Amino acid sequence: MPQSNLFNRQALYLRPDPTRVIVRPFKPSTEPRHLNPRDKSRANEIVDRVLSLDPTATANQLRDILANFDGRHRNLLRQFELRADAMEDAFQHHQRFSQQQRQLVGAYFMNEYSFESAALFNPSIVPHPDQSGVADGSRRLIISLRAVGEGHISSLTFRSGVIDAEGDVTIDAPTQLAGLPEIHASDGLAPAGCIGISFKDESDLSERVIFPVTEAQSNGIEDARFVAFDDDGKTIYFATYTAYSGSSIRSELLETTDFLNFTLTPLRGPAARNKGMALFPRRIDGRYAMIARQDSENLFLLYSDDLHQWDEGRLLMKPEFAWQFVQIGNCGSPVEIDEGWLLFTHGVGPMRRYAIGVTLLDKHDPSIILSRTVEPLLQPEPTEREGYVPNVVYSCGAMRHGDLIALPYAVSDTYSNFTTIKISRLLETMHPIGAAL
């Protein structure tokens, strides 16, 4: 029978909040030229209209905009100016214009976007890089979440919290403000396609939204699987995620040490053409290791000397039980315990129901499966099955905390919750490989 009663489900319920908004560039739609012939682009015509206003009307319009929107965003005038800077071609027919005119033009080409109005799901979890002031036995956390807004565009957002010695979790309330980072060109030493982004020091963690910035990501940054990676004693936070263009996908890698400055880099190689890649939290025998589902159905173990190049791997697991006959996938990076690597997996069964199980891999050779759960550990409860995609529980990463595993999970692609389980009880539910079923 499923072992859901082993988990300490906590009623945290991180739900989407349509009042949290960012400002982003707005591009007016255009009709085919044969339907509406124009001498100028629609953007140029809007700029012409704005610059035709006299100074008093310009000032009044700008004052009204600030009265309505300034308290909802940081440095709104500066964002208007940056938007105008990106539209220099639209000003080329105008010899003289004021700073206020430029700011007003910028306002006409930006809009508010409720980035988590539809869903807040598929979480992962890592220790916070700042553990100062935390009580003994407790640990400060960072939870990453996939946020979905208008047009089903996915972005990456964060929450902070604390797990105490008993495993009780509290999540800090997010700020009402939210904003996008500044984008930087990568240097000549960075891999091809690498992009740097940074947030202001004064921004709260929950303010920071990583929104699609490239064509490959234009319809979503999906399902980030964060891991605190031990790089010879230094902790680097990596996250593998799916970049979705609206027609194609690829796996990319996010890197940070402080959750203020990030790099986003496309991964190369045959394995990166699919989704659901999860990096081990340290090298194994000097090589990077990854769990991936490169064929959309089974799980594979991959090794690489290059963090950004992933070729085909070795088959690790196939769907074997009724609750996973459709496909299996990882639920984030493997978690290291004394007995080996705990790999949480999801399985898809009848009626496209998603459930979560776990497998124990050998610590020195993770291609060896030591034990596994035959029945689901976590599956949709009657009170947690309704949502945008019903009958789904899903996670993008767990974390060890003393003798506990902390596992955030999503409910029906809509909202997120949190559960914990003692490692000893988890191991007791697992079936040794080779023993009779």
Image (cartoon, grey):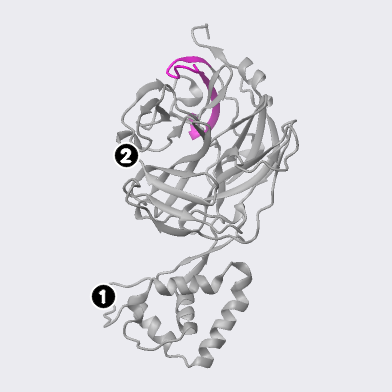
Residue 214 location in percent, x, y? 37, 55
Residue in view at x 44 percent, y 69 percent: 26
Classify the position of the N terminus by image quarter: top right
Residues in magenta, as a range: 347-371
* Residue behind mark 2: 268
Q: Which mark is residue 245?
A: none
Residue 262 location in percent, x, y? 47, 49
**Residue 285 appears in the figure:** yes
Q: Residue 362 vs residue 215: left or right? A: right
In the image, is residue 303 above or below residue 107? above
Extreme-left residue of the structure: 34
Residue 184 location in percent, x, y? 41, 58
* Residue behind mark 1: 33
SS under mark 2: loop
The question of residue 370 being in magenta is answered with yes
Q: Amino acid at mark 1?
A: Arg
SS under mark 1: loop
Q: Quadrant of residue 418?
A: top right
Q: Residue 238 vs residue 194: left or right? A: right
In the foreground, 411 or 64: 64
